[in-house]
Image: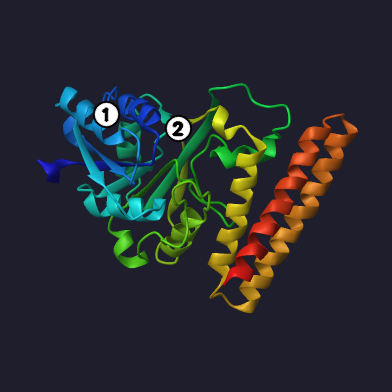
Amino acid sequence: MASDFLISIVICSYNRSALLLDSIASLTKEKTPPSSFEIVVVDNNSSDNTETLIKDFISAHPKYNIRYIKETQQGLSFARNRGTEESKAPLVCFVDDDVIVSEYYVQKWIDFFDSHPEAIGAGGKIKVQFDDPRPEWMPDILLPLFAKHDLGDEIKKYTKGRYPIGANFVYRKHIFEKAGDFNTKLGRKGNQLEGGEEKDIFLRITQHNDNVFYVPEVYLWHRVGAQRLTQEYIKGQALGTGKSISVILIDKSFSTKLFKWSSEIFKFFAGLLLCLGYFLTGKISKGVMIMKFRFWVWKGYFSHRKSI
C-alpha cells in the first residue's frame, strides 16, 4: 500500500538516460524491503530515450515501486516540486540522476529519522567519482562544483554557511507546507547551470525548524564524466552561481546585500592567497583556475543585474 511507504526517493533527470539507469539500479540493490520505499523518477522534458528506458526498467523490475512522471516545465526546481507533490511517503529524499548509492542507503535514512524524531531534514556525505581522468588544472577547492560534501565523520547540525547538497538530502514532507516549494527562479534549466535553490530552501525551512543534520554514514558517489571536466563547464557553473546570487538578492535588504558582497570579496582574496600558494609550489594551472572561477562568478552576477 502507498501509505506504507516510509520514504520516497525522488530522482529528477534531464537527458542522462544511461546514468539515470545506473542510479536506479544501485537503489534496487537495496536490502530494504521494496514495500518500504518508492522511487519517483521525474523526467524534466528530456529529448533523449529516458522515457523508453525507464518504462522498460520498471517493467523488468515489478517488485520495486518505481513511478515515471513527465514534468514539462523546464527547470530542476519545477521537477523537484513535482517530485515532492507526487511523493507518497512522509520523508522525501532527493538524489541526482548520476549517483551510485552506498549499501543500505535507504535503510540508513529510515533508521536516522526513526532515531532522531526532532530532525526536520538531513544531508548525507557525497564523494566524487571521476569516470574520466581528473585534469591537472582542477584544484580541490572547486570539487564542491561536482557536489563533493564532506563535513567530517560525526553527525552534526548544519551551522551558518553550511547546508545539504542536492545530490543527497532528505526533508520531512510536511515542512514544505510551511516553507514553500523550491524557488523556480533558481536552479538549473535545461543546459543552463544556475544554482542556489538548495540553499534557498534550506534557509526557508530553518526559519521554521533548524533541526537539519549532516549524516556522514548515509553517503553516495557523484559521478563526473569527461563532458564536465572542461574549463568551459566550470565557467558555466561560475556564471550560473553569479546569476543565482543576483536573483536571491533582488528583494533583500541593503544590509543582507552588503553582507553577501563582503562574503564574496572575502572569497576573492582567499582565492588569491590560494592562487599564490599554488604558484609557489609550481602548480600554476590550479592557481589560475581559482582566479578565473572567482572572476566568472562576479561576471555572472553583474551580467544578470544589467539584464533586469
Q: Residue at x 59, y 65 (%)?
A: 246
Under circle 2, the secondary element is strand
Tell me where residue 165 appears, x and y as whole percent. Answer: 49, 45
Horizontal relation, residue 267 to residue 229: left or right: right
Mark with earlier residue (2, 1): 1
* Kind of residue sitting beneath label 2: Tyr
In the rendered view, would you say 209 is above or below 106?
A: below
In the rendered view, would you say 176 is above or below 113?
A: below
Tell me where residue 304 appears, x and y as whole percent. Answer: 60, 65
Towards the viewer: 190 or 95: 190
Towards the viewer: 298 or 27: 298
Q: Residue furthest right?
A: 280
Which image quadrant for residue 38? top left
Q: Disc 2, disc 1: CB below 8 Å?
A: no
Towards the viewer: 150 or 99: 99
Q: Can the viewer see residue 175 in this picture?
A: yes
Mark 2 lies on residue: 219
Q: Residue furthest left?
A: 1
Quadrant where the N terminus sits is: top left
* Kind of residue sitting beneath label 1: Leu
In the rendered view, would you say 172 is above or below 60?
A: below
What's the mark number on residue 53? 1
Which image quadrant for residue 146? top right
Under circle 1, the secondary element is helix
Q: Residue at x 50, y 35 (%)?
A: 126
Tell me where residue 177 appears, x and y as whole percent. Answer: 29, 64
Camera-near label (2 vs 1) is 1
Tell me where residue 232 appears, x and y as whole percent. Answer: 64, 40
